[in-house]
């Protein structure tokens, strides 16, 4: 009897229903423009002016839109298919200008001169540490999700080279795990300068220790576990604790002092442009008015010259297809910019609604707020709120803040109450600033002082927040007099 072949294969057809989400080009562009802060959007606009001849800078001022009126949603049409034979770039157009049949259609003259002059009058941004890191990061073969995550991390690195935004906050903003953020951080820390993106000085110093250093083990122990005890007057007690000769401890500490304390060494922030707020909130009597910054952007219009060419029946079909594609691209850009303005204003309205106590009374009255709350209120996806907040700033009556500042993480007290971290930190800083400099407060005393201000948190939390805002402990403040 012949055995059945267990490796027989046959082709079969099985119908299956599934849902797939496909984004149009316009939707992708809307998300891209929404993500850009004011300075980057300005650069993007000038790039589009260079690449799209149908876009022009309007001589007329942008029409004023009342901030109090509800703005109707923008209906974004789908883009028509691109003709395979149509020129794709300005370079293609310039090549075709050499042909006599095209010369009558591309006589732009003063229009192009005005564009070039406007772009030449736009100053270049000096390269900052963040720009330098991001340039290297883009050269790596990474997923789009990792690129977006890495960009947010890099532009949350301060001018000293340290990451001040909590990993958990970045993870929440991108709806990813903390482990994913740590993976991106590991990539960024290997860029030049190495160690940029470290969370604190101790972590950065550990990264600089060579593996072949015979004192590496002792140095890692001192930095990793006893970093707060490396003051000269504490070394004898530390030597006794570790059962090591004082000379060995002193030598290791001297070598640690020779390490670079700042990942940003070699980069200067003096020429970096000041932060441009994307939103300005001004108090008028008992109300707050919102202004979305647009005065720095050139007011764009679609060229009447090209619209006339498109309507002209004598225009060559190939030229007509090219003009139609470029005009559609220009309209899509204008709609994306308008949609960004509407969305920014609506999110700013919700920030005022949820954080009214902050705007009325200051930072100590900041409340815990999750991005999901605003997303639900506006009826949009959480990722939309994340894009709105990314790398954007708002000018308020109490100063300039990142828009993410209003969506701070929370701390739960023993009573089950919740406080926004920035509010606790502001109160803690105020308590220490008012202390007797001759007799600094201990963490227990700071805890009691905060309790009197209705911030009931533990001594451990006080120590944690004190370290986060780089305030020394009691003994260090006393010896620093």
Image: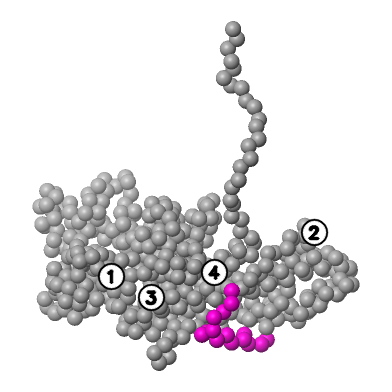
Q: Please give the residue where the numbered disc 2 appears in the rendered image.
A: 85
- Which mark sits nearer the N-terminus, 3 or 4? 4
The spot of residue 242 in percent (x, y) is 14, 50
397 shown above or below 211: below
67 in magenta:
yes
Q: CA distance from mark 3 to mark 1?
A: 14 Å
- Disc 4 element: helix
Looking at the image, is mark 3 or mark 4 nearer the viewer? 3
Image side of residue 453 versus residue 311, left or right: left
Looking at the image, is mark 2 or mark 3 nearer the viewer? 3
Q: Residues within 10 Å of mark 4 (few under 14, many from 20)?
A: many
Q: CA distance from mark 1 to mark 2?
A: 60 Å
Taking the spot 89% from the left edge, 68% from the top edge, the residue there is: 100
365 in magenta:
no
Taking the spot 46% from the left edge, 59% from the top edge, the residue there is: 149
Quarter of image, res 181: bottom left
On residue 419, which mark appears?
1
- Disc 1 element: strand
Q: CA distance from mark 3 to mark 4?
A: 22 Å
On residue 298, which mark appears?
none
Quarter of image, res 192: bottom left
Taking the spot 67% from the left edge, 80% from the top edge, the residue there is: 57
Q: CA distance from mark 4 to mark 2?
A: 31 Å
Residue 452 visible? The answer is: yes
- Which mark sits nearer the N-terminus, 2 or 3? 2
On residue 34, which mark appears?
4
The front one of 90 and 373 is: 373
The spot of residue 212 in percent (x, y) is 32, 45
């Amino acid at each position: 009897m012949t055995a059945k072949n267990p490796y027989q294969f046959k082709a079969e057809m099985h119908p299956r229903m599934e849902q797939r989400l496909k984004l149009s080009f316009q939707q992708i562009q809307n998300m891209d423009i929404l993500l850009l802060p004011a300075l980057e959007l300005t650069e993007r606009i000038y790039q589009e002016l260079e690449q799209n001849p149908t876009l022009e800078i309007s001589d007329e001022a942008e029409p004023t839109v009342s901030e109090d009126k509800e703005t109707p949603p923008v209906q974004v049409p789908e883009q028509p298919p691109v003709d395979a034979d149509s020129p794709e770039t300005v370079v293609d157009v310039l090549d075709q200008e050499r042909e006599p049949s095209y010369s009558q259609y591309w006589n732009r003259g003063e229009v192009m001169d005005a564009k070039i002059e406007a772009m030449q009058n736009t100053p270049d941004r000096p390269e900052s540490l963040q720009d330098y890191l991001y340039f290297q990061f883009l050269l790596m073969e990474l997923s789009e999700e990792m690129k977006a995550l890495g960009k947010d991390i890099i532009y949350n690195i301060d001018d000293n080279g340290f990451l001040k935004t909590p990993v958990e906050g970045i993870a929440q903003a991108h709806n990813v795990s903390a482990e994913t953020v740590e993976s991106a951080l590991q990539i960024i820390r290997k860029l030049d300068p190495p160690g940029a993106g470290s969370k604190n000085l101790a972590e950065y110093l550990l990264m600089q220790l060579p593996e072949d250093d015979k004192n590496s083990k002792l140095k890692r122990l001192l930095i990793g576990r006893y970093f707060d005890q490396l003051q000269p007057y504490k070394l004898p007690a530390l030597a006794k604790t570790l059962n090591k000769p004082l000379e060995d401890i002193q030598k290791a500490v001297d070598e640690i002092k020779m390490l670079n304390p700042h990942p940003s060494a070699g980069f200067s922030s003096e020429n970096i442009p000041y932060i441009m707020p994307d939103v300005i909130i001004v108090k008028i009597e008992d109300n707050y008015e919102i202004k979305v910054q647009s005065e720095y952007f050139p007011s764009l219009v679609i060229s009447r010259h090209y619209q006339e060419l498109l309507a002209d029946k004598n225009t060559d079909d190939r030229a007509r297809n090219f003009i139609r594609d470029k005009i559609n691209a220009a309209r899509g850009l204008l709609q994306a910019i308008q949609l960004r303005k509407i969305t920014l204003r609506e999110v700013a309205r919700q920030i005022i609604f949820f954080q009214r106590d902050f705007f009325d009374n200051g930072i100590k009255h900041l409340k815990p707020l999750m991005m999901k709350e605003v997303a639900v209120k506006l009826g949009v996806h959480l990722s939309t709120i994340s894009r709105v907040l990314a790398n954007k700033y708002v000018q308020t009556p109490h100063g300039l803040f990142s828009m993410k500042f209003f969506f701070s993480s929370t701390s739960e007290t023993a009573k089950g109450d919740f406080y926004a971290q920035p509010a606790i930190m502001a109160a803690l800083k105020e308590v220490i600033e008012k202390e007797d400099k001759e007799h600094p407060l201990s963490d227990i005393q700071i805890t009691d002082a905060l309790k009197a201000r209705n911030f009931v948190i533990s001594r451990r939390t006080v120590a944690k927040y004190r370290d986060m805002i780089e305030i020394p402990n009691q003994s260090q403040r006393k010896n620093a007099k």
